[in-house]
Image (cartoon, grey):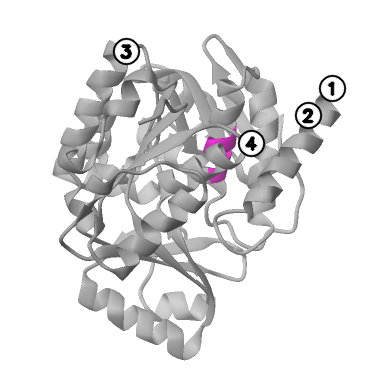
Amino acid sequence: MATVDLFAIGNALIDQEFKVSDDFLIQQNLQKGTMQLTDGDTQAILYSNLQASQVYKGQASGGSAANTTVAFSALGASAFYGCRVGNDDLGKIYLDGLNEAGIQTAKQSISEGVTGTCMVLVSPDSERTMHTFLGITAELTDQQIDFAPLASAKWLYIEGYLSTSDSARVAVKQAREIAKANNVQIALTLSDPAMVQYARQGLDELLDDGVDLLFCNEQEALMYSGASTLDEALVKLQSLSKHIVITLGEKGALIHNNEHTFTVLGRKVTAVDANGAGDAFAGAFLYALNAGFNYKTAAELAILISSEVVSQFGPRLANADYALLLQNFQKECA
């Protein structure tokens, strides 16, 4: 298998996106802005209710780390995605979708079982609420991951959603060991406030003795650190990573680059759908670092890409759009 710049591990989920009302979220007892795990039967009932009363917006090969990997790849770098899908139609759709985006996958990712799904519910304020049936991805193990490309990769990227799976955490531990043995930098995202609240022990295990780069949003940073201010949170998070990126929504991002802390202002857009914004930010940021950009310029590119994602429905842009945005960004920086 060819050498890649980014080796990512994450859940494999087919996203089904709907535009929903706030009343619908209340009726379904869903906590707005978070991810909630469920079983297959409950997911089927919700899907039926959504089809009957809400607005369907589309389907994609989703998962947090997958969205990040797509942005990274579409901007011009190479990537591999380690995951687990079922030997079913959705599993084929999932892997085909990643391959069409230029991302390498392995045949061993396919196993008996049902491919997971995520109902992505976008409310009028553009906030996304997720209802997830993990399916076979909940049982991701090292047996479904081809670790060969990792030894020569530049980055290992881990999504915090894996914190809920005992077997996935074991696979991540193996990936971390390979990365450290080969001087591959490790990046991790906390992924979701629900992971910090309900799967804290799992996140601690994924982080282990620390990472090279930590992504989180403001709420996750405060919750994980137990701090009351972002300045205090940054100090506490430095025990886990020398490099920290805290996304602040429309306000931009707070960056701690080893010894220096600075803010990069956001970009004003009309928000339509927040789903995938943080994932796209991480993908663009990692691409920029891999391309030799400094942390400030990387954050500026990441804000540009993620703000465009927020401006439309769905967690990803068309592949050609990433390249065009990068081209225009480089012209402005020249």
User: How far apart in space, not on screen, are marks 4 and 1 (Cα)?
Assistant: 17 Å
Counting residues from the start of the chain, the first of labels 4 and 2 encountered is: 4
Per the image, the residue denoted by label 1 is 334
Give the alpha-carbon distance from disc 3 to disc 4, as whole Å.
27 Å
For marks 3 and 4 on the same chain, the one whose residue lies earlier in the sequence: 3
- Residue nearer the viewer, 221 or 87: 87
Q: Position of residue 29 (x, y in %)?
A: 35, 74
Q: Residue at x 42, y 57 (%)?
A: 96
| Label 1: which secondary element | loop
Residue 112 occupies which quadrant of the picture? bottom left
Q: Is residue 312 magenta?
A: no
Q: Nearer the viewer, mark 4 or mark 1?
A: 1
**Numbered tag placed on residue 182 in the rendering:** 3
* Range shown magenta: 280-284
- The residue closer to the viewer here, 7 or 96, is 96
Q: Nearer the viewer, mark 3 or mark 4?
A: 3
Q: Which numbered disc, 3 or 2, marks the residue that appears first in the sequence?
A: 3
Q: Amino acid at mark 4?
A: Ala
Mark 4, other Cα within 10 Å: few <14 / some 14–19 / many ≥20: many
Query: Does residue 243 show up?
Result: yes
Which label is found at residue 330? 2
Picture coordinates of residue 8, whole percent (x, y): 38, 36
Quadrant where the image shows the C terminus: top right
Would you say the residues marked 3 and 2 are in contact, meaning their CB atoms lie under 8 Å apart? Answer: no
Asked if the residue under mark 2 is in contact with the one under mark 4, i.e. CB atoms within 8 Å, the reply is: no
Q: Secondary structure at mark 3?
A: loop
User: What type is the residue that disc 3 sits on?
Assistant: Asn
* Observer able to see residue 226: no
Q: Which residue is mark 4?
A: 302
